[in-house]
Image (cartoon, rainbow, N blue to C red):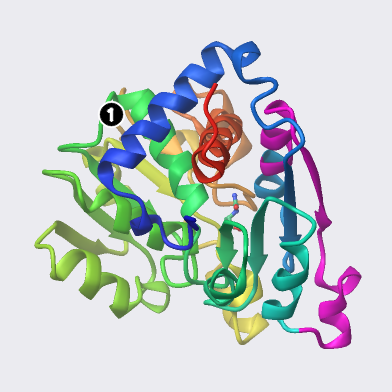
Amino acid sequence: MRHLIDVMDLSVGEIEELIALATDIQAHPEDYREVCRYRKLATLFFEPSTRTRLSFEAAMLDLGGSTLGFSEASSSSASKGESVSDTVAVVGGYADIIAMRHPQEGAPLVAAMRSSVPVINAGDGGHNHPTQTLTDLFTVYRKKGGFSGLTVGLCGDLKFGRTVHSLIAAMSRYAGVRFVLISPVELRLPDYVREQYLDATGVAYSEVTSLDAAIGSLDILYMTRVQRERFFSEEEYLRLRDCYILTPEKLREARADLSVLHPLPRVNEIATAVDDDPRACYFEQARLGKFIRMALIMKLLGVSK
Ligand code: NCD
């Protein structure tokens, strides 16, 4: 039995296979409409979500399966003091696969250790978000045809942004990828991510504070929201929340073939006027998330068409 707790649980080859399967699913959805008949996905969301939870549910429904679950901790027995471990031990008796989001780093790993069915990490605190990374990789692949040699700018809250951590890990495995880490000093990439995936692997990267100075060199610009819920002080959040705002004026300095990604939700780090720019890919990215999650569910359940 396989779980997906960290994106590095998947080899480069497996990610390639998932992208190929997601591409086929998108092109021929009718071929996949029954493959998960009588299978159930449980979505255990102890933290808010729109895209991740609904795209998981839509994914399972489009595979012919069904879904059950909860979307806030307060409506589960966690509010009575039940442990994550006990919750999954029980849910494994009702569902064939579990997608879990939790505010505590490591909670899905603890769940996987106790679970009798595959567990997918749908975001754990400020740590990892492997299925967002699969979505991001699928989008980059769609736009660029591959990953090698790309210059990837990551901008905003690199400290608490879990999607950034998983994306750096995954992309550090492709030859010639270069990262430009754009953040205020207070929101720099955590040392453990930099040491493990950049310093140890020799991947080229730079850390800068100016988006304007960096934007012209990028193939991909990955914007992120300042993660208010992970700040210790509201004052600090208010001071940093508007540190980067991508506008049509700023985009004038960017390449014509830049792709702008964002895991969403957006607060105000991308002006809505950017949405009509052909370089804005974030809504397409959200749509692609369903297909790659369909591919992942099939892989972890060991089903094929
Ligand atoms: C992200 C998350 O939950 O980490 N959202 C998502 O899953 N698409 C990004 C965020 O909340 O800023």
Q: Element under label 1?
A: loop
Q: Is residue 93 above or below residue 265?
A: below
Ligand 1 shows up in the quarter that is bottom right
Q: Is residue 188 above or below residue 290?
A: below
Q: Which residue is mark 1?
A: 255
Question: Which residue lies at the image location 9% right of the left edge and 62% below the top edge?
Answer: 202
- Residue 186 sits in quarter: bottom left
Q: Give the x, y percent position of residue 18.
A: 42, 34
Question: Would you say 60 lies left or right of 191 here?
Answer: right
Question: Would you say 75 lies left or right of 263 here?
Answer: right
In the foreground, 191 or 94: 94
What quarter of the picture does the C terminus occupy?
Answer: top right
Q: Give the x, y percent position of residue 71.
A: 81, 59
In the foreground, 148 or 225: 148
Question: Which residue lies at the image location 62% right of the left edge and 36% below the top edge?
Answer: 272
Q: Is residue 99 above or below residue 279?
A: below
Q: Is residue 282 above or below residue 257?
A: below
Q: Is residue 73 magenta?
A: yes
- Residue 137 appears anywhere in the view: yes
Q: Give the x, y percent position of residue 253.
A: 31, 35
Question: Which residue lies at the image location 73% right of the left edge and 30% below the top edge?
Answer: 37
Q: How many marks?
A: 1
In the foreground, 128 or 297: 297
Kind of residue sitting beneath label 1: Arg
Neighbor class of circle 1 (other Cα within 10 Å; few <14, some 14-19, many 20+) is some
What range of the chain is rendered magenta?
56-82
Q: Is residue 66 magenta?
A: yes
- Residue 211 appears anywhere in the view: no
